[in-house]
Amino acid sequence: MYDFKTFPTQGKTKTPWGDGSGYVIASGITLLTTESHGGIHVSDERLVEMPDVIRNLDPFAGRGWYEEHCDWALVAMAFPEHFSGEHCRAAIRTAHRWKNEVNWDAYLTDTAQGRLCAKKASQTAASMQP
């Protein structure tokens, strides 16, 4: 699923899943993988930029660590400018199914990040139509 225009990280990084390496998606947002798992790390500086509804959710691996199966969707929805329309589309579906206690429809219409994510997802869906 990941296909970013990224730069490799320098050396190994300690993650909740063990030592990993990966790619810098954007300043303070790093995709990391280990031999067994992976996810996205968001720095403290970037966490404060997240909309409250997302920042206040507890990721499975702990503050700032968004695992690759579901939590990653929160990062894509918070920073859609760094993710493709396909990522945004998958993130919206994942968030609706996984964190259904959040009113994602309101998020997608009431925040700048949500509107951008929804727009990119919609454009991707439209381009997939015959």
Image (tube, helix red, strand yellow):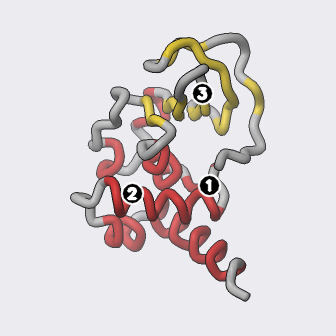
The reply, left or right, for residue 8 in relation to residue 99 is: right
The residue at the point 49 percent across, 69 percent down is 115
Instruction: Classify residue 114 by image quadrant.
Output: bottom left
Q: Earlier in the sequence, mark 2 or mark 1?
A: 1
Q: Tell me the distance, in whole angstroms, between the alpha carbons under discs 1 and 3.
A: 19 Å
Q: Tell me the distance, in whole angstroms, between the alpha carbons under discs 3 and 2.
A: 21 Å
The residue at the point 70 percent across, 11 percent down is 11
Classify mark 3: residues with Cα within 10 Å, few (<14), some (14-19) or many (20+): many
Task: Look at the numbered discs 1 and 3 and tell me whether their residues touch, using CB distance below 8 Å.
Answer: no
Front position in the image: 3 or 114 = 3
Q: Nearer the viewer, mark 1 or mark 3?
A: 3
Instruction: Classify residue 107 by image quadrant.
Output: bottom left
Mark 1: which amino acid? Glu
Q: Earlier in the sequence, mark 3 or mark 2?
A: 3
Mark 3: which amino acid? Leu
SS at circle 2: helix
Classify mark 2: residues with Cα within 10 Å, few (<14), some (14-19) or many (20+): many
Q: Which residue is label 3 attached to?
A: 32
SS at circle 3: strand
The residue at the point 61 percent across, 68 percent down is 120
The residue at the point 40 percent across, 37 percent down is 48
Mark drawn on residue 81? 1
Mark 2: which amino acid? Ala
Q: Taking 69 as reference, is 113 above or below it?
A: below
Rendered location of residue 70, percent (x, y): 43, 46
Q: Earlier in the sequence, mark 1 or mark 3?
A: 3
SS at circle 1: helix
Q: Which residue is label 2 attached to?
A: 95
Classify mark 1: residues with Cα within 10 Å, few (<14), some (14-19) or many (20+): some
